Image (cartoon, rainbow, N blue to C red):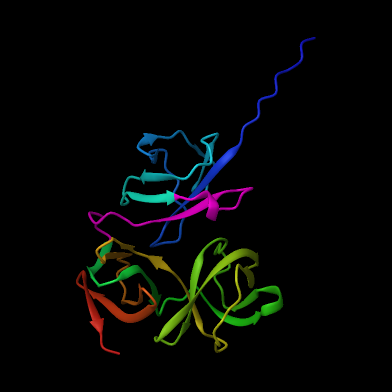
Amino acid sequence: MENGAVIRCRLDLLIRLTDTTTGRAVSSLSVSFWKDGKQLITRLKGDGNYIFIDIGRENFLMKLSVPGFDSQEFIVDYETLDKRMPSIDVFLIPSENNESILTLSGKMRGLTAVEAVQLGNPACSINEFIPKEKRMTFIMPNRQMNMDGNRYGLLHGEKDYEQFVVKEQLNPLSVKLEQQLNEEFAVGSPIARIIYGRVDSKGNYVLRVRDTAETLRFLVRFQTDGNVKYRVYRFEDGESIEEKT
């Protein structure tokens, strides 16, 4: 009886694709990935997870394209990733030719990032935070909501919000965070999912949201070098209008 050959493979990268406007995983057989201009073979493992086997662990420029979304480019830097399971979350921005999309765009000197949370439509509200356990409990959550790995903002009125990432959903009423909360909060403060935009090297930005045929008001966060600004926008007839607050 011949000895069977042992084939060893190494998972070198996991990419998770999420529609930033909905928080839903994006699983498509038509997605394409390129490493330094060369198309990669990937395997879709469900729930927006794409794995790459034996591609090496040298830093490279990745480009990806998914039908219905803007293409993206980013550096895969293995020094910043987990050595056992190198993974990257990519938040896809819907294409501007999508009829259900509303766009906020402009230019700001020194801008490095733009994001927003929707006002008046919280995912849930905070009840308690236990620092020792990095555990947050909720009031009136959506019990069908999967919060694992998602990014949220804990609102302080309409002034600003504290960002946090859910490491693990423990049950429908509580989650474990990746980090501590740093700011004080009031019980019942709303929690909203973060929507990410795009900024180029010249400070031009694009932020897109879904048109849900309801009053759309967003608290937009502009990050510049060493400074953060918040502005409230509402969308009417497909146009964004800045509210004076």
Question: Magenta span covers which residues?
Answer: 76-100
Q: Position of residue 138 (x, y in %)?
A: 60, 77
Which quadrant is home to the C terminus? bottom left
**Is residue 11 one of those drawn in magenta?**
no
* Residue 78 in the image: above or below residue 118: above
At horizontal 63% and vertical 77% (from top left) the residue drawn is 137
* Residue 241 in the image: above or below residue 80: below
- Using residue 104 as the reference point, say whether residue 191 is left or right of it: right
Question: Which quadrant would residue 161 be assigned to in this image?
Answer: bottom left
The dominant secondary structure in magenta is loop
Q: Nearer the viewer, residue 18 or 226?
A: 226
**Is residue 77 one of those drawn in magenta?**
yes
Q: Position of residue 48 (x, y in %)?
A: 49, 48
At horizontal 22% and vertical 54% (from top left) the residue drawn is 97
At horizontal 26% and vertical 66% (from top left) the residue drawn is 203
Question: Which quadrant would residue 39 be assigned to in this image?
Answer: top left
At horizontal 55% and vertical 34% (from top left) the residue drawn is 54
Which quadrant is home to the N terminus? top right
